[in-house]
Image (cartoon, grey):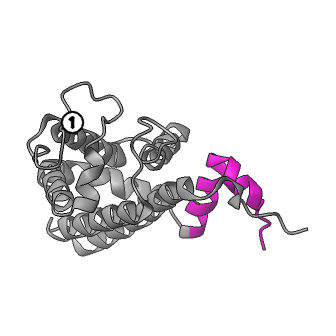
Amino acid sequence: MQTINEPRLESDLAYRFGYLAEFLGFGPDDIAAIHAAAPVLAPVVPALVDAVYQKLHNYDATWRHFLPRQYGYEGAVAQDMAELTPDHPLIAYRKQHLSRYLAALVSKPYDAKMMAYLDMVGKMHTPKAGSKEVDVPLVQMNALLGFVADALTSTILGLGLERANEVRTLRAFGKLLWLQNDLINRHYQPADAAPQAVA
C-alpha cells in the first residue's frame, strides 16, 4: 500500500497530477494515443467548437458568463445578452481559446508546463485568475466538460478508426478529461478544505 501525503495533494500540482494519473492508469500509451489522434481530430475541431458554443448559447445560466470582459480580450463588450450574439467578436475570441485548448491536448507534451496549463483552465473560470468579474459556478463547468467529453466521444466514434485503436483513443481521452475535471474542481474548494494527513 502506498502512502499518499494528502495535504501535499492540495499544494503540489505535479504531485497531485502524478497521483491521479497513476490512479487512473494514465500513462505514456494514453498520451501516444491522444497525440496520434491529432491528424484526424484537427479537421473536425471547428465543428466541435461551434457545437460547444451553440450549447452554451442555449442557456442564460451559461451565456451570461461571457458578458464581463474576458481576460486578454480588448474589443467591444456586449451590454446585455441580446447583444451578445454567437457571432460577437468576444465569442469568436473565446472560440479561439477553446480551439487552442483542444489543439494543446493532442499536440503538447504532458510535462510540468502542460500540467500548469490544464490547472489554469480551471482557475481562469474563477476570480482567482484573469478577470475578477469572471466567476463561473461549478455546476456550469461540470455541464460544459461533460458536454465536451460526450462530443469528443461522438467525434472519435465517427472517425472510422480500427476498433482496437478506437478503444485506446476513447479510454485515453476519458482518463485525460477526468484529470482535467479534477483540475477544475480543485479551484472551487474553500481554502481551509485541505485534508489532514493520517498520523
Write down the region rendered in magenta: 1-23
Q: Which residue is mark 1?
A: 93
Q: Residue furthest top?
A: 74
Q: Nearer the viewer, residue 52 or 179?
A: 52
Q: Nearer the viewer, residue 86 or 52?
A: 86
Query: Is 117 placed left or right of 173 in the picture?
Result: right
In the figure, 199 relative to 52: above or below? Answer: below
x and y percentages locating residue 44 in the rendered image = 13, 53
In the figure, 176 relative to 134: above or below? Answer: below
x and y percentages locating residue 178 in the rendered image = 45, 65
Tell me which residue sits at (51%, 55%) in the image: 183
x and y percentages locating residue 131 in the rendered image = 41, 36
Q: Give residue 138's quadrant in the image.
A: bottom left
Q: Secondary structure at mark 1?
A: helix
Indicate the amino acid at tag 1.
Answer: Tyr
Tell me which residue sits at (63%, 57%) in the image: 190
x and y percentages locating residue 23 in the rendered image = 60, 68
Tell me which residue sits at (35%, 62%) in the image: 140
Q: Nearer the viewer, residue 121 or 75?
A: 75
Q: Nearer the viewer, residue 73 or 61?
A: 61
* Magenta run includes residue 3: yes
Tell me which residue sits at (56%, 60%) in the image: 21
Quadrant where the N terminus is found in the figure: bottom right
* Magenta run includes residue 64: no
Q: Give residue 151's quadrant in the image.
A: bottom left
